[in-house]
Image (tube, rainbow, N blue to C red):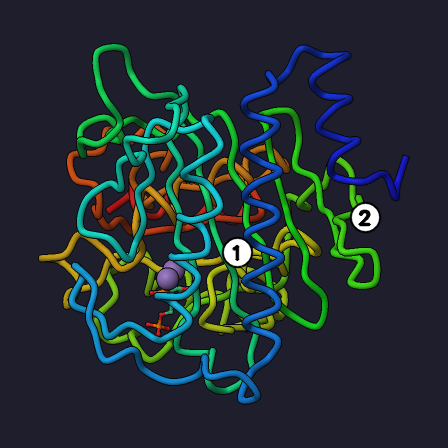
Amino acid sequence: MNGISLTRYLIEEQRSKAQIGADLRLLIEVVARACKTIAIAVGKGGLGDALGDAGTGNIQGEAQKKLDVLSNEILLEANEWGGHLAGLASEEMDHPHPIPGQYPKGGYLLLFDPLDGSSNIDVNVSVGTIFSVLRCPEGMTGAEDEAFLQPGTTQVAAGYCVYGPSTILVLTLGNGTHAFTLDRELGSFRMTGRDLQIPADTKEFSINASNARFWEAPVKRYVNEMLDGKEGPRGKDFNMRWVASMVADVHRIVTRGGVFLYPMDSKLKDKGGKLRLMYEANPMAFIIEQAGGAATTGRERIMDIRPTKLHQRVPVILGSKNEVERVTEYHAEG
Ligand code: AHG
Ligand code: MN
Ligand code: MN
């Protein structure tokens, strides 16, 4: 089955399993097309005029890179006219982008982190796009923040595209997690991994260790036990990796297992965490769970959180099931 195009995969899902309708199929195709455009912009590097700061900031108070702004525009322009969406929300926009009046509106909401891992753009390290699809609730237009405030369990699709040595789209429609690699000559995504499965156990963890002194006790205990290696309570050595692009770190975990943590720490308390629930944590949690992994804040399942704000932040612990369960137990023990 390997090697079928994304288009064929979507059509087969639509036909045989009635898993998706024509609107959702169009939506995924349009997002994939936008990701190709972003991949081209990212790939031009210093040859284009895309590197460096945009000179503006987003609602989270972060400086925007030119490619953050450009990727956001690419996703908006690709998606606003097709008639499949009621509204779009993004890390780079304070409030949802309504569908312009001249276009028909559809029943879905699209949320995205247009370019994840911005700090890596200028140093030629992998970055990515993350997206989540929800249904627009009855009685809402899709232009209000409230329309988007649904728990991750209501997602109908989620995916990410990693712009690395190859461009890979990883997608779930709630029926397993599948990978599609961009064939640059043909310009089409082809399936290179069906039903990805994350091993339940791992010897690899991913955390920004420079925050160690700010972590809560359960995370300190968990990481220290891994650092103690063979001689410690875990009785085995662990390896550590941190790309600082969530997409790249998650992609490694989806490929060969591992555990990723951006936990609560004392300097993040006021913000609620580092990563954003609606367009980083929820879509990644959906993808990870569909691949047999788990995703929690340390205290609750990510996808069960009832969101209160569009740009809400949460602690994130995800990946190989047994490791995520262990950290979560350490939190419960206090
Ligand atoms: P973004 O570039 O969309 O703001 O996201 C960056 C996120 C995430 O990709 C990554 O895991 C994390 O920030 C890195 O944070 P540190 O720089 O604190 O390691
Ligand atoms: Mn991000
Ligand atoms: Mn981003």
Residue 259 placement (x, y as % from top left):
52, 56
Q: Residue furthest front?
A: 102
Which secondary structure, mark 2?
strand
Q: Is residue 168 above or below residue 65?
A: above
Q: Is residue 310 left or right of residue 277?
A: left
Question: From where the camera sits, is residue 325 visible?
Answer: no
Residue appearing at x 33%, y 80% in the figure: 210
Q: Is residue 19 above or below residue 311?
A: above
The residue that mark 2 highlights is 192
Q: Nearer the viewer, residue 81 or 279?
A: 81
The three-letter amino acid code for the residue at tag 1 is: Val
Residue appearing at x 66%, y 45% in the figure: 198
The three-letter amino acid code for the residue at tag 2 is: Thr
Residue 315 placement (x, y as % from top left):
29, 51
Q: CA distance from mark 2 to mark 1?
A: 23 Å
Residue 88 placement (x, y as % from top left):
33, 39
Number of numbered discs visible in the structure rendering? 2
Q: Nearer the viewer, residue 242 or 238?
A: 242
Within-10-Å neighbours for mark 2: few <14, some 14–19, many 20+:
some
Q: Is mark 1 within 8 Å of ligand 1?
A: no
Rendered-image quarter of ligand 1: bottom left
Q: Which is more N-terminal, label 1 or label 2?
A: 2
Q: Nearer the viewer, residue 95 or 261?
A: 95
Residue appearing at x 28%, y 57% in the figure: 92
The residue that mark 1 highlights is 259
Q: Nearer the viewer, mark 2 or mark 1?
A: 2
Question: From where the camera sits, is residue 268 visible?
Answer: yes
Q: Is residue 237 left or right of residue 74?
A: right
Please identify the quadrant where the N terminus is shown: top right
Q: Nearer the viewer, residue 4 or 244?
A: 4
